[in-house]
Image (spheres, rainbow, N blue to C red):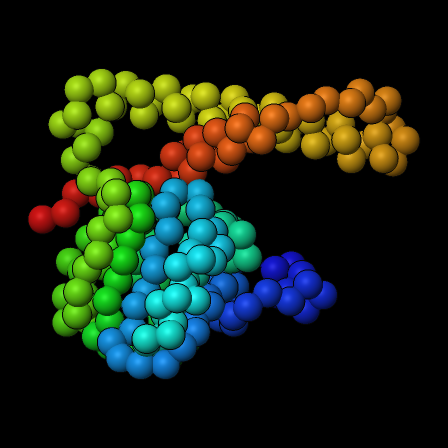
Amino acid sequence: MAHWQHQHNPVPGEFHIVDGYEMHIDCRGEGSPAVVLEAAASAPWSLWREVQPELSRTTRVCSYDRAGHDWSEPRNGNRDAETIVRELHSLLDQARVNRPFIIAGHSAGGVYVREYAREFPAEVAGVVMIDSSSPQQFDELPGARAAYEEDKRDAKRELWKTDYAFGRGGNALLGAVPCRPRTIRDGQASTTRWRAGLVMLTPTKVN
């Protein structure tokens, strides 16, 4: 599906098959070491749309979509940091990204950056943390674990309501049910997407 959409609505970058699913990566510029950008929870590659063009004037810069984000296909199974990092490793192999490279992570992306450096230390020339999350933050910050669990519950409820609303909208277009106009403010929609990302973030301990 993602490949078909890309053919009809081209986006920058390439698609590669990782463990049977398509993943999207966009590499620009020339130079070494390359820079690999890891976005925050639920954020797509386009989070870096203002950063990547500037960095690519100096060296090769790659941003990508984790599985289930934007142009990369969703997949079942464990979505912890180890799994995500191994998928990224395979994607970078197929995209012919030379090692070692610099890897930068924003917010929850910092968890994956730490794990990549732990699993593949010889491939990492440097690490950049941008307002990074920590694997221990949910247990060490007062109230963080309770807030995290509450956000997960809220996200599931919001996703259910969103799916229901879109389902009613689709059925209304087909004439199955009457459509009642409803307005979602941008701030509410953004909050829902951010909270949905928390459900996908499974912290991992880093030795």
Q: How many marks?
A: 0
- Residue 179: x and y in percent read 82, 24
Q: Quadrant of residue 1?
A: bottom right
Image point (59%, 65%), residue name: 11
Whether residue 141 is visible here, answered yes or no, is: yes
Q: Residue at x 17, y 20 (%)?
A: 142
- Given residues 95 and 182, the one toward you in this image is 182
At x 37%, y 19%, the residue is: 150
Q: Residue 148: horizontal and vertical position, in percent?
A: 32, 25
Q: Position of residue 106 (x, y in %)?
A: 31, 48
Residue 110 vs residue 84: left or right? left
Question: Which residue is most to the right?
Answer: 175
- Asked if residue 170 lies left or right of residue 27, the reply is right
Relative to 54, residue 133 above or below? above
12 in relation to 41, above or below: below
Is residue 17 found left or right of 140 in the rendered image? right
Residue 19 visible within the image? no
* Quadrant of the rendered image containing residue 19: bottom left
In this picture, residue 15 sits left or right of residue 114: right
